[in-house]
Image: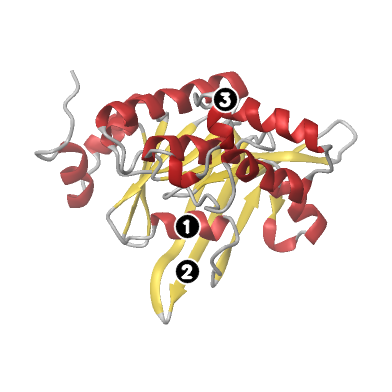
Amino acid sequence: MIAHVSKDNKPMDCILDQSGREVILRADKISVSFSGFSVLQHLSLDLYRGEILGFVGGSGMGKSVLMRTILGLNRKQSGAITVFGRQLEKISERERKYVERRWGVLFQQGALFSSLTVRQNIQVPMREYLKLPQKLMDELAVLKVEMVGLPREAADKYPSELSGGMIKRAALARSLALDPELVFLDEPTSGLDPIGAAEFDDLIAKLRETLGLTVYMVTHDLDSLHSICDRIAVLGDRRVLVDGTLEDMMAFDHPWVQNYFCGARALKRV
């Protein structure tokens, strides 16, 4: 690992891999167990700035477990997690807050607060991390609503008044509340019809281009992998089996990987 330093020899917010790519997130030899059952064992994975990474694996294999461990919602038994050049296990609470301000999260079911409007949901992270006048927060919330393709009037609706696709977009708007550099998406297209899923994929791709986002996407959606992911990492046997392009996946000699990417239900591309 090569440290990235400034001219005055002070550490900067990234690390570089051996090929010179900027690593915005590094999971290094992560092990996670629940009640003595090992879910992840010595798993390592890098996420590079500006890419959309699709993280796939069988149901119950630990895809969301790794994401939640990175976010600090699950306890790991060993390993190190480095985000923006900072090893999370070794930083102060103040530095941790600084790191958290620079990422956004969309959970699988949206995780919106049912008693709050969309506008109020988007303002939750603003209230936690920023000190802004209410009027400015209202304006910013509506801006985020429009950014994800929702009408302005959706800002004053409650989650129960939204369709499944609108809930996903509202949750995405909340994840963008603090203008993050890194966004975690947990099964963002699950529960959406094919048209809605394709539109959501297009939205993610456009936001990456316009906002310069780095995207860590847990998914099982082959369409998403084909259409917007720059790189794919496959979880299996409690570790990352392979990462690379779709072509790398199809050429990798492992039963699950072959069945997933080349099986009867896999999408065919010329």
Of the image marks 1 and 2, the number of the one nearer the N terminus: 2
Q: Which mark is residue 152?
A: 3
Residue sitting nearer the eye, 123 or 102: 123
From what the image shows, is residue 128 above or below residue 243? below
Instruction: Determine the residue positioned at 53% across, 60% down.
Output: 69
Residue pointed to by mark 2: 32
| Secondary-structure class at tag 3 | helix
Residue pointed to by mark 1: 66
**Would you identify the image quadrant in which residue 269 lies?**
top left
| Secondary-structure class at tag 1 | helix
| Secondary-structure class at tag 2 | strand
Name the image colouring.
Answer: secondary structure
Residue sitting nearer the eye, 95 or 155: 155
Of the image marks 1 and 3, the number of the one nearer the N terminus: 1
Query: As drawn, is 241 to the left or to the right of 2?
Result: left
From what the image shows, is residue 58 above or below residue 53? below
Q: Position of residue 230 (x, y in %)?
A: 42, 28
Which residue type does callout 1 highlight?
A: Leu
Instruction: Determine the residue positioned at 72% across, 33% down.
Output: 138
Residue 222 in view here: yes
Query: As drawn, is 220 to the left or to the right of 135?
Result: left
Of the image marks 2 and 3, the number of the one nearer the N terminus: 2
Q: Residues within 10 Å of mark 3 (few under 14, many from 20)?
A: some
Instruction: Determine the residue positioned at 48% across, 67% down.
Output: 31
From what the image shows, is residue 37 above or below residue 103? below
For the N terminus, the quadrant is top right
Which residue type does callout 3 highlight?
A: Arg
Q: Position of residue 208 (x, y in %)?
A: 54, 25
Tag 1 near tag 2, CB within 8 Å: yes
